Amino acid sequence: MNEISFSSQKEQGKLDSVASDVLRNVRLSKGFIIWIGFLFLALAACLFAYIIQLKEGLGVTGLRDYTSWGMYIANFVFFVATSLVGMLISSVLGLIGYNWVKPISRIAEIIAIAFAAVAGLVIISDMGRPDRFPYLFMFGRIQSPILWDVTVVTTYLVLSLLLWFFPLIPDLAISKNRLHGRPPLLVKAYEILSLRWEHHESQYRILKQALRILLILIIPTAFAIHTVTSWLFAVTPRTGWDSTIFGPYFLSGAFVSGTAAVIIAMYFFRVNYKLEKYLTPFHFERMGRVLILVSIVYIYFNLNEFLVPGYKLKTGDAIHLRELFTGHYAMLFWSVQLVGLVIPVILLLIKQMRRPVPMMIISAFVLAASWLKRYIIVVPGQGHPNLPIQNVPVEWVLYKPTLIETAVTMASILLVLIIITILSKLFPVIPIWEMAEDEHDKEKLSGNE
């Protein structure tokens, strides 16, 4: 479309049709108020648990001298991992030229923003003295991977926000005069955030150039964010973490959890927002193929992660692998590998299983297993220190999360859901101008114009 002003009657009709479909969900419905109210009430209850932890100290959790990284750090790694899906969908698949990702890209960016934003707060929940968090910026040492981690997480969050907001500007301009019956404050927000956009061809040209630069920049940033997170483990000589492949191992796992999260969100928006026209079975089928690909890559790195130390079987590795394969963590370990990786790949190879409902169910299992996988990475390795554990209470030897710890972890998950709910309810979740432009281009190619 050379002149992207939607000036002709046919172009305007397509634009009106897409805008009508997408904007009918941009309203404060009774269901939305009930849902967001429930989320905030649950969050308040969980935050009360954090206040108890803040007053009493980390002693109210299951964290002790030996297992000092537990559920909180597993949750942090999971959040960072899932946030990488914005880069995978928007940048990698988008830059390759797969146009089918257009209606999915904004959903992926919303998920990336929510998980990346909350990831930093999860780290604070693990700190006994959160008031000392500013010291990281004031006195941080460049040698510390923790400083690198904070830097790349912040950078990735900023880039994700820009990738979400820039394509939203034309939609805000399109929508601001179509928000009849909506709260005046929301209409005013659309007017301000649209930045006086007038749909000139030059504006779209600049926008697409800026987006291309951001899509290129976010790829190394996304690789850095989870590689650095893996280095928090890999730079230690601890059994179970002392691995040279932790970087790609973490990255491949990130694409699995992120893809599963996007598929679940797609199904929710398709059903509850009545977006069957834009989130079609074709999109689920394609996302199913993506999930198969990233899962197979992750299975490969899992084989590398356990086969190599299993072949050499050093003393520490032997103890660690025995605990995973046949010991205390065996049930959890094999459940994660089978239910979260192997069985989903086998099922998704069947075309009928790549339909919306089966895809959503499979993705829910994959996402839950992805969280448990981080738990398996973080916790078991701390139970086998180089020095023997002597003269300590039994609860110090075997880590078990407490109710307080679980509630604080749930707070972060609730906060993610709140961010996703607000961003997807108050702003168009499907890119209006891109879908209208895509419809026009398809019609030109088919010869109907």
Image (cartoon, helix red, strand yellow):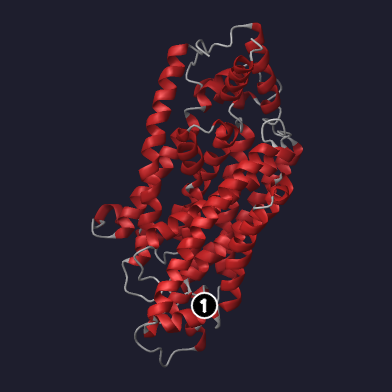
In this rendering, the answer to whether 174 lies above or below 145 is: above
Give coordinates of residue 218: x percent, y percent. Answer: 39, 40
Give coordinates of residue 387: x percent, y percent. Answer: 34, 87
In this rendering, the answer to whether 31 lies above or below 233 is: above
Query: Between 43 and 286, which is closer to the camera in this rendering?
Result: 286
* Label 1: which secondary element: helix
> Going by the picture, which residue comes out furthest to the top?
8
Residue 84 is left or right of residue 44, and the answer is left
Give coordinates of residue 79: x percent, y percent. Answer: 50, 54
Crowding at label 1, few (<14), some or many (≥20) Cα neighbours within 10 Å?
Answer: some
Visible residue check, residue 67: no
Quadrant location, the C terminus? top right
Residue at 56 percent across and 60 percent down: it is 370
Query: Between 136 and 359, which is closer to the camera in this rendering?
Result: 359
In this rendering, the answer to whether 296 lies above or below 241 is: above
Which amino acid lies under the numbered mark 1 shown in the image of this protein?
Leu
Disc 1 marks which residue?
324
Residue 329 is left or right of residue 252, and the answer is right
